[in-house]
Image (spheres, rainbow, N blue to C red):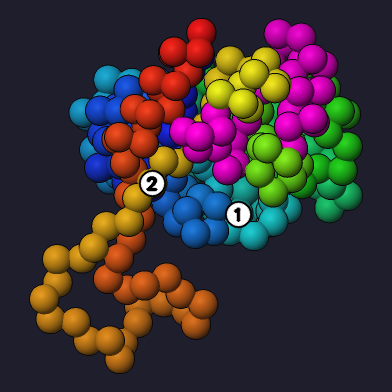
Amino acid sequence: MRVEICVDSAAGAFAAEQGGADRVELCDNLLEGGTTPSIGCITVARRRLKIGLQVIIRPRGGDFLYSDEEMDVVREDIRAAKSCGADGVVIGCLTAEGEIDRQRTAELIGLARPMNVTFHRAFDMCRDPQKGLEDLIGLGVDRVLTSGQDDSCLEGLELIAALQRQASGRIIIMPGGGITPRNVERIVAGTGVSEVHLSARRSVESGMKHRNTRVYMGGTLRPPEFTWKTTDPEAVRSVVTALRESM
C-alpha cells in the first residue's frame, strides 16, 4: 500500500513525510481543489523531502476546459516542476463535451517525461468514466485520482471498484476524496486498490496578538482570517498504521 498526502505548503510536505507517507501531492489553494504551487514552494519541498514529490499543474480553480493562454501557463509550469526536481506532475484536461482531451493530454505527457503523470479528479467530471479510463490507459498515464465520480470515495465505492477491475494492472486507480483514518481500511477492502490519497489536515491558530477583524484579505465567502489548515503528521501516521495492520 502507498499513501499519498495532499499538502499545500512545504511545511505540510515535511509533516506528511514525518507521518510516514510515501509521497505528497504539492498544491496551492486547496479551497478551490488545488492549483499550481509556486516555484519557491516546490524548490524548498524538494530540497528536504526524501519521499516522492508530485506537483499539481492547474492554472486556476473551476472547470478543466482551458484556453490557449492557460495551456501556455500549464506547459511552462510543467517545465518548471521538472527543473525543480519533481518526481511527477498531476494534470487534467477535458473537452467541452466532457471527454478526456486526448490531444492536449498527450502533449503534456510528452512534455512531462521522464516524470510520472497522474490524471487528477478532472476524471470525476468526465461523461463516461469507463471510456475515459481507456483513453488514459491508451495515452500512457500512470495513475488516475478519483472519488468514483461522487462526493466522497465511500459514496463512489462501487465505481472505484469497477474501475480497478477494468484497469487490470494497466493503470493505477488511486481513490481520493473524504478518506480518513476511520474509513480507509473499508475503502481499500471494498475496492482492491494499492494506493490512497488524502489530506489529513488540522486547524492551526494564528500567533497574531493584534487582530484587525474589520479587514479580510479575500472574497465574501471566506475562511477565518486567523486560523488555517495544515497537514497533521499524527493523522497521516494513523492512516499508514491502519493500512499496515490490515495487510
Please, what is the three-letter code of the amino acid marked with disc 1? Glu
Query: 224 above or below 114?
Result: below
Residue 146 visible (yes or no): yes
Q: Give the label on residue 155, or none.
A: none
State left or right for residue 81 relative to residue 60.
left
**x then y, percent, for residue 118:** 59, 28
> Quadrant of the rendered structure where residue 122 is?
top right
**Residue stretch rendered in magenta on the structure:** 156-184
State left or right for residue 219 relative to residue 101.
left
Q: Which residue is mark 2?
A: 201
CA separation in Å, label 1 and label 2: 30 Å
Q: Which residue is mark 1?
A: 70
Please, what is the three-letter code of the amino acid marked with disc 2? Arg
Name the residue rendered at 60%, 41% in the picture. Answer: 177
Query: 46 above or below 223?
Result: above
In the rendered image, the residue lying farthest to the left is: 209
**x then y, percent, for residue 195:** 55, 20
